[in-house]
Amino acid sequence: MASRSITQDHAGLAPKQKELVEEGFRSGIIKIIACTPTLAAGLDLPAFRAIIRDVKRYGNYGMVHILVLEFLQMAGRAGRPRYDTYGEAIVIVSTNGDKEYVIEHYLNGEPEEIYSKLAVEPVLRMYLLSLIASRIIHSPESISEFFAQTFWAHQYKDVSRMEKQITRMLDLLIEWEFLQQLNDTYRATALGKRVAELYIDPLTAHQFLDALKRAESIKLKSISFLQLASNTLEMRPLLRVKQKEFEEIQEKYALIEANLMQHEPSMFEPEYDDWLNSIKTALMLEEWIEEKDEEWMLEHYDSRPGEVRAKIENADWLLYAVHELARLMNYLPLLKEIMKVRLRLRYGVKEELLPLIKLEGIGRVRARKMHKAGIKDLGDIRKTPIETLKLILGDAVAVSVKRQVGSNELS
């Protein structure tokens, strides 16, 4: 069979597309995978040879050399133990100087140090709350003892400074009402326990709660919730507003400003760029629930199917967290609206199609066909003759839909 090449970025593929590529490569149908370093993150494929085109990437300050660790990850895709006894990694260089650099820096060089992620504030906030909510730690002594045994403490060495950072995080969690301190003991509040269970950054939860308090005074639309989910650390990397798009995004923002639950930061604050990026990301998600397809997303937002799907799934998870917090705080009128947006995100449909997409075998395309034919809810399906339905959906799906709505026509 002739060799085939997959030249798409692995990160930009939808899950099913990735699965097909991997299965094709394992079976030998696909001979070559051309990909970005995303594929080098640890996927175990039967590749005998890895060809590294170059050892530079575009960074914040132009082209920079990749890390030794990243190089080893890429080279390590060749000759997997389950498939080969050895493998080959080939690096393409342009000059003898480049060749010497690769040998010295990557082949004979030492991998970079690995640093503990606990030092990153969002991670520390999450784990502190989770550990206290799980009753693994509860007193200042047990907190100090636990973190003194971590890789972070081993690496950081300055225990006093580390404890100050932990204390600052604890004070924040108390201020946000996720923790309370009684008799020198920390306990998670009911709200704090739910935030820990939702596995979101406590800062994100705090921002959600602040937004929900303002929701009553705002005319809420789908974009209200989509932007709220987009303006979080969990949604990053956000779609970036390019220089040529700045005025266009500003104009679109002006149209939805009154519907947003969060206040716009000053243009001179460092958060402003992320805010504007969250607007663009939310606008892309709104295009999806307005039934724009993947080609539209690629053309207008430069987002490939896998990237769009990842954003949709992240937004759905975050909106579930918003729903749970709203339920816990008794913002009951909001629950229905949040569920609508989540359903529309899941299926990529306008609100008018929600009664139809609940049926098994009915997605956005079939639901839209039915709606155009005047079939708008389950009652319409019951009244529509089976032969008419077959013309719209095909024989098997039409029969299945009739059965799901309990039609007497099939009895």
Image (cartoon, rainbow, N blue to C red):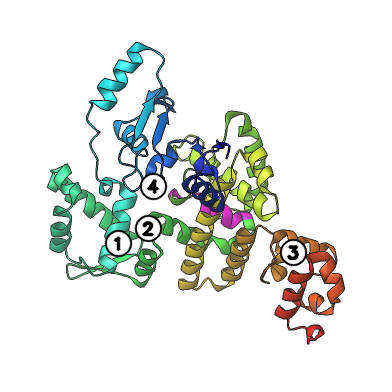
Gap in Å between the C-alphas at discs 3 and 4?
Answer: 39 Å
Q: Secondary structure at mark 3?
A: helix
Estimate the x, y position of residue 124 in percent, counting from the top left. 28, 53
Q: Residue at x 47, y 35 (%)?
A: 36
Q: Are marks 1 and 2 in contact (CB under 8 Å)?
A: yes
Give the SS element for disc 1. helix
Q: Amino acid at mark 4?
A: Asp
Q: Quadrant of the C terminus?
A: bottom right
Does the magenta portion include 319?
A: no
Disc 4 target residue: 44
Amino acid type at image mark 1: Leu
Identify the residue shown where x is 67% and y is 49%.
287
- Within 10 Å of disc 2 (Cα), the crowding (few <14, some 14-19, many 20+) is many
Identify the mark nearer the N-term, 3 or 4: 4
Looking at the image, do the residues carrying marks 2 and 4 touch, with CB atoms under 8 Å apart?
no
Q: Nearer the viewer, mark 4 or mark 1?
A: 4
Q: Is residue 302 above or below residue 394?
A: above
> Could you tell me which quadrant the N terminus lies in?
top right
Label 4 SS: loop
Left/right of residue 238 with respect to residue 119 in the rendered view: right
- Please tell me the numbered disc located at residue 367: 3
Give the x, y percent position of residue 201.
Answer: 38, 56
Q: Residues within 10 Å of mark 3 (few under 14, many from 20)?
A: many
Q: CA distance from mark 1 to mark 2?
A: 8 Å
**Residue segment shown in magenta:** 223-233
Label 3 with label 2: CB-CB less than 8 Å: no
| Residue matched to label 1 | 129
Q: Is residue 82 left or right of residue 7?
A: left
Q: Amino acid at mark 3?
A: Ala
